[in-house]
Image: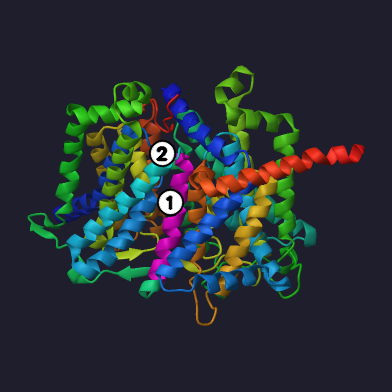
Amino acid sequence: MTETKRTLESRLLRGAHRTLTGLSPAFESILAAVVGLLIGAILMYIWGFDPWKAYIALFKGAYGGLYEISSSLSRATPLILTALTFSICLRSGMFNIGAEGQLFMGATASILVAYVVVPAPFGQILGLALAAVAGAAWSLVPAFLKLTRGVSEVISTIMFNWIARWLVLYLTIFLLRDPMRGEKTISIPVAARFPVMVPRTDLSYTIFVAVAFALVIYFILWHTTVGYEVRAAGLNPTAARYGGINNKRTMFLSFILGGVAAGLAGATITMGLPPTYAIYGGAAMPQLTNVGFDGMAVAMVGRNHPIGIIVAAIFFGGLNAGGRVMQFYGSNPVPLEIVRVVMGAIVLAMAIPELIRIFPAVKKQGRELTGLLRRLTRRAPKEGEA
Amino acid sequence: MSLNDVLSLLRISLHAMVPLALTAVGEIIGETAGLFNIGLEGILLLSAFMAVIGAKAGGPAVGLLVGMGVGAFVGLLFSVINTYWKGTQMVTGIGINLFAMGFVAFGLIQLGAPGFHDVPKVAELAKVRTPMGSMSPMILVAIILPFLVFWFLKKTRAGLMLKAAGESPEAADVAGININRIRLYATTFGGMLAGLGGAYMSVAWMGLVTKDLSAGRGFISLACVVFSGLNPLLALLGAFIFGFFQALAEWVKTLPSKPIPAQFVSMLPYIVTLLVVSGAIGRVRFPKSLGVPYKRE
């Protein structure tokens, strides 16, 4: 029985690997982003907006100055981490779409720092540690269910997202509530917050946590034996097992690392995002909602590579930050939600491995470009010799 | 718990069963032919939203038709990407879900209020008076359809062709079956059923559309499919079980004594889904070529 089950999932995965680690990754990602933005533009046009003006407002709002760039980087911070959750698990051969729930648990756990008094660096460390443990714990249950009962992680992680949402709502209403202001939880104390990096923006030092974690994941996956085993198990579980790799161990490891990443993402929001430093907004919980799902889009565009993810997160963070500007842009206020439409369209475009083949002209251009590059690189050493 | 309570619980269960049953049966058809669509959640949400626009323009029947059309269109898109363009089914599904989340939230703002939109009473599908209280006629559709699909898959030539496309596309191709086309038909039809389920939720059941109206139902339907092992009749049973626990959660919330906090009650359907799926795995067998794009050698 597990045999048929395993083959089904490995089959689904083989496709994902082929698509998401393709031949000319950066080029395909950029093409997908362009297709996504085009579809967004068409929809804006249909709803009666001016897409050109909207995109100008958006990109000015995203990268137009120091404040805008800081704001984009601040939005990118949790996205880097939730994208890592998805991509570590995909590298090891699993679809962990539970970053959303793990992020909720991490954010809630980090709030607990408010109840202890510790001096400056330890408050931050304690908060991150609590969040990491909570995220990992929340991600271990689906891993355990998969291992013992063969429950597909696609279903179990989604169910855990909803359970986390309701659990966090209960905790924020009844246990962690700010006695002074009922609409939010108690705030992280000043000593335990991550300080703001660029004055008068919401970019704090948490971005270093995210980037550092991405680099750690890069190191683990590509420069350690364990990481090699994780990737081997993801590429071909059967071959990996014959090669003496313990697939269960790699699965648990990737779920734990993924859960830690998502938990940290929650902590970067509560501990490093001015002005509230708390979970607020009742059932909507606007700062936390959808960060986990957006992370999947970031992971795919970043080609499931930690470095690619950082670049993609800055792009998507920019879309989110710029979207906020766009929605108040004078005569042409396009709602922020168009950003997620664009994200979905980008992911759809990413799903097509031969996107280039569908647009023959683009393919021809691409071939000419790669040919040109190849010729240039071939000529370079000759000139060096001469 | 009086007889009236039991009856109302049963009535809500049947209403909650409909979208799950329709979506699950649609997905069974698609999976039999070899395509695994995790974009059901997105189809439900998109069609629920578009159905409201249709219903406001031309009445409930138009609403349901628009929902079916939207579902069929998304199913068609999904299958074109994953048959002719050899795409990746998981990624396509995630893309559909993200797209739907954004599109519906965006559309709701354009319709007036961010977050939700009420369906006017005239645009809602009327409920039929029965001895058990007023029931939506769609319940009947959701109960009859699995039997029809069961018969179709087991007894007709076309059903066998679907199965062949999912089990052994190479052999079916040699026998002269156009694999890509049959997968396209199957997923489009499956998407249409999911679209009907979505349209039912907004136009015939709840009477409103919110940006998280589907609330994981697409994935619960997937759990139904796993539970059923691609048997539409078992999927109907699964849908009823999940519908019952959703109804139970709603019912406990209305109790004046509030025995359990509402947030914990709301978790119930998801926990039950996990439990049922953990128990069901083991006897389930999926088609051999589920999830693989077919390429001629």
The span shown in magenta is B87-109
Q: Which residue lies furthest to the top in this view?
A: A242
Q: What element carries label 2?
A: loop
Task: Say which residue label 2 marks.
Answer: B84
Q: Is residue A360 above or below residue B287?
A: below
Image quarter in which the N terminus of chain A is found: top left
Please tell me in which quadrant of the rendered image residue B2 appears. bottom left
The x, y position of residue A182, in whole percent, is 52, 72
Magenta residues, dominant SS class: helix
Task: Say which residue label 1 marks.
Answer: B96
Towards the viewer: B257 or A305: A305
Please tell me in which quadrant of the rendered image residue A370 appears. top right
Q: In this view, does B85 lie above or below A74?
A: above
Subunit of mark 2?
Answer: B
Left or right side of A150 for B61: left
Q: Residue furthest front?
A: A386
Subunit of mark 1?
Answer: B
Left or right side of A158 for A315: right
